[in-house]
Amino acid sequence: MSTATIPLSNPDEIRTLFGAQDANLRRIRDAVGVSAVLRGDVLILEGDDAQVKRGQEVVQSLQSIIAQNGGLSERDVQRELDHTSPTATAPPAIDLFEKARRVAPKTPGQADYVDAIRNHDLVFCRGPAGCGKTYLAVAMALNALRREQVRKIVLVRPAVEAGERLGFLPGDLLAKVNPFLRPLLDAMQEMLDFDQVRRYMESDVVEVVPLAFMRGRTLNQTFIILDEGQNTTVTQMMMFLTRMGEGSKIVVTGDVTQTDLPPNIESGMQDAIQRLSDIDGVGVVELTGRDIVRHRLVREIVKAYETSPRTGTKPRRR
């Protein structure tokens, strides 16, 4: 991990360099892969050696443009990012906290998914079990929190009643919904130690909430993940997506081949993808069996269910 400090001359230069709502700074951080934090009148860059070097080049070039022109345009920023863009290499690790487990996309499909999250404010990811949909979304949420792009993370799941009604499950409300929300917390706890996750939850930096509890809220500067999105209705999905506030990002994950909705109910995820995929700022990623990174048998199991028809016969007793 390398660190570099870049002095900034005055508040006007800082405002111009960072852009409205820090838009320029976010573009630099996303494109270069470097952490950038302002401390007083000094910009601190962190990352590997190549990232920090590129980050310095970009920021110092933009400072020169500001000094010469008295301003900075989006085209100026993009030109400098294009000029210093690296040649294609292996997908970089997702920058997490110092004591966090190293996380990086392992397949080209996963790399495309991570890029889509970096470059879009709303991303839908469809794919089979084990392809990293939820895990990588949680990693990118922690990445955004580390880089101070968001102030909190909200993890959401629809509490679809499959066989048992919530009212008949034991315990209070938290105990009732815990089984539905557990996969999201498991992903986070694989990356961070338990005490850090607990501190985040106690301070409301990380919030875990059933989908039904999202109604009426507006979430600003928040990274929101909706897991199992195929189990939402059209109305629920519209309600959820309209919770997005200023500076927020939403990732919706799901496997549309495994919906637990009644047969006559359309999946809100499928409907949203059809309605929204052509809107600027919305990304849709399709992962496949080639992106499965769990036990090797998971890939074979998914393949068998996709290619083999159901016979309807019962196994013979022996």
Image (tube, helix red, strand yellow):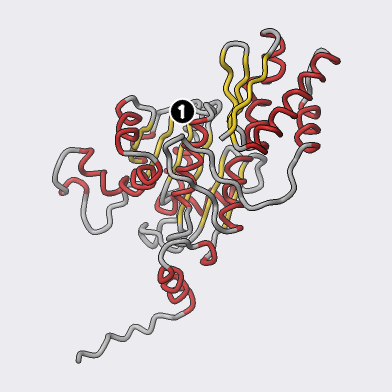
Q: Residues within 10 Å of mark 1 (few under 14, many from 20)?
A: some
Residue 210, image x, y percentages: 33, 40
Q: Residue 103: image x %, image y %?
A: 49, 47
Left/right placement of residue 84 relative to residue 297 reads: right
Along the line of sight, the residue nearer the viewer: 4 or 135: 4
> Residue placed farthest to the right in the image?
68
Image quarter of residue 178 = top left
User: In the figure, 9 relative to 187: above or below?
Assistant: above
Instruction: Report the residue at 68% width, 51% height from top.
Output: 89
- Viewer-closest of 71 and 232: 71
Asked if residue 86 can be seen in this view, the reply is: yes
Locate the C terminus by quadrant.
bottom left
* Residue that numbered label 1 is attached to: 219
Q: Amino acid at mark 1?
A: Leu
Residue 276 visible: no
For the N terminus, give its image quadrant.
Answer: top right
Q: Position of residue 266 (x, y in %)?
A: 45, 56
The percent coordinates of residue 56 (x first, y second) are 70, 27
Decide: is 129 above or below 30.
below
User: Which residue is pictured at 44% across the width and 54% down the height?
Assistant: 230
Q: Is residue 191 left or right of residue 33?
A: left
Closer to us: 267 or 264: 267
